[in-house]
Amino acid sequence: MDHQGHYAEAFCPLPDRCFRLVNSAKSGAQGAPHHCPLPVASVGRFKDSQGRWHDVEACVDHDGDLIEVFPVNQR
């Protein structure tokens, strides 16, 4: 599974989860979005396609999409 990509511009800011949704590799669900399974490494702010800002948590593969990024151990 390629964890670096994400599913369209889909995201879901839940506590202790990477905000990005990725393509599923499960049999019968290929291509369907699901939460990125990698552990959270950073917190920061994310601007969605509508221009709204969100406080989110991200894994190391997806924290490049954030601004004002801080490692989780410095919260």
Image (cartoon, rainbow, N blue to C red):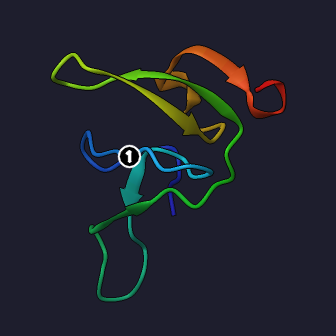
68 sits left or right of 65 in the view:
right
As drawn, the residue found furthest toward the right would be 73
As drawn, the residue found furthest toward the top would be 68
SS state under label 1: loop
Residue 59 at x, y = what percent? 62, 42
Figure quadrant of residue 8:
top left
Residue 45 at x, y = what percent? 48, 20
18 sits left or right of 20 in the view:
right
* Up-down relation of residue 15 to residue 63 (above or below): below
**Residue plotted at (37% across, 48% down):** 12
Q: Give the total of numbered labels.
A: 1
**Residue plotted at (38% across, 46% down):** 6
According to the picture, the residue beneath numbered tag 1 turns out to be 6
48 sits left or right of 70 in the view:
left
**Residue plotted at (43% across, 44% down):** 13
> Quick one: label 1, few (<14), some, or many (20+) residues within 10 Å?
some
Residue 18 at x, y = what percent? 54, 47
The kind of residue tagged 1 is His
Relative to the observer, which residue lies in front, 3 or 43? 43
* Up-down relation of residue 27 to residue 47 (above or below): below
Figure quadrant of residue 73:
top right
* Up-down relation of residue 14 to residue 72 (above or below): below
**Residue plotted at (31% across, 50% down):** 7
